[in-house]
Image (cartoon, coloured by chain):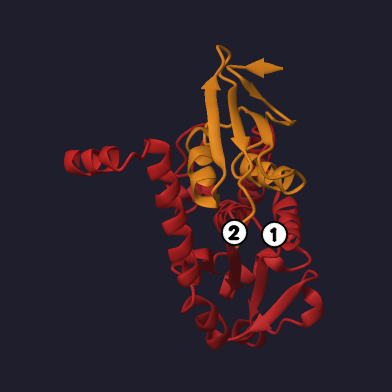
Chain colours: A red, B orange
Amino acid sequence: MLDQTDTANRAGLTEEDVRQIVRQELERSQKRDPASRKLAIIASKGTLDWAYPPLNLACAAAASGMEASIFFTFYGLNIIRKDFEKKLKITPVGNPGMPMPMPMPDIISGLPGMTSLATLMMRTRMRKHNVSTIRELLDLSRELGVKLIACDFTFEVFGYREEDFIKGVEFGGAAAFLSQARRAHVTLFI
Amino acid sequence: MKVNNVIEDRVLDARGLMCPMPVVKASRELMLMQPGQVLKVIASDRAARTDFPAWVEDVGHQLLRSGQESNGTLVFYVRKREESE
C-alpha cells in the first residue's frame, strides 16, 4: 500500500487523480460486464410484509441505473393482481418474529378476524412511519422501467386470467426468468 | 445558500420518506439537472446515511459533503457526474 502511494506520488498524481483513474477503470470494466448492472428477483410470497423486499430492491436498483426484473411466482402473484390490496395480508401465526404489543400464542392468533386485525395493525404502523404503500411501489416500479413478469405456470395452475393482473405485467416461464438471471450478477429468491 | 464553498443548484427535501424513496427521488431529480450541478438532499431516514454514499459511488456522482444536523436531519451534497457511456 505504501509502495503504491509512493509510486503515485512520484508520478505526480494526487489522490483525486488516482480516484479518477480507478473510477474510469471501473466504468470500463462495467461496460465490458453488463451483468453488474442487472438484477433479477423471484418474488414467491404473497403476504403484505413479503411484498416489500422485491419492490424496494427493484426500485433502488433502478434508481442506481440498473435494469431490474421481478419474476412473480406462486403466491408472489398476489402482489401484481388487481385486487392486491385485498389479497396482501399478514398473520402472526407461525411468525414468532412479528413484533406484537403483547406475546400471543398461535392458538389466539389463529382465531377468526385475527389476520385482518394484524394486517390493519401493520398498515397503520407503516403509515405512521411514512412507508410507501405497495400501490406506490408498483407505480414507481413501472415508471422506472422495472420488468414485472408473471409466472405462466402458476397462472395456469391457479386458474388466473390475464385480466386479473395490473397493467404493464408481462408473462413468462422459467426460461424467461433464466434468460434474465443468467445475464445478471444479482439474483435473489424472495 | 452556501456551506463550505458548496453551492447547490437544487434542493430535494426528502424528510419523512423511507428507504428507498430518498435515493429514488434524488436520482430522478438529478436526471433533470446538468452534469456538474449540485443537488442538496435533506433526509430523515436513517438508511440514507449509508445509502447515499453507496449509491453515489455506484452511479458515479460525487458526494461533496454530508452531515447531520443536531435534530438528526441528514444533509447530502451530490454533484452530478459528467456525461459518459
Chain identifier of the residue bearing label 1 in the image: A
Please name whichever residue, A58 or A62, is drawn nearer the observer in this view of the structure.
Answer: A62
> In the image, is residue A167 above or below residue B38?
below
Q: Give neighbour class at mark 2: few <14, some 14-19, many 20+ (Cα, 10 Å).
A: many
For disc 2, the marked residue is A58
- Residue B37 appears at what percent x and percent y? 69, 37
Please name whichever residue, A53 or A31, is drawn nearer the observer in this view of the structure.
Answer: A31
Please name whichever residue, B53 or A98, is drawn nearer the observer in this view of the structure.
Answer: B53
- SS under mark 1: helix
The residue under label 2 is which amino acid type? Answer: Ala
- Residue A97 appears at what percent x and percent y? 43, 45
For disc 1, the marked residue is A141
First in sequence: mark 1 or mark 2? Answer: 2
The residue under label 1 is which amino acid type? Answer: Ser
Chain identifier of the residue bearing label 2 in the image: A
> In the image, is residue A19 above or below residue A68?
above
Residue B39 visible to the viewer? yes
- SS under mark 2: helix
Q: Quadrant of the N terminus of chain A?
A: top left
Q: Residue at x 53, y 46 (%)?
A: B55
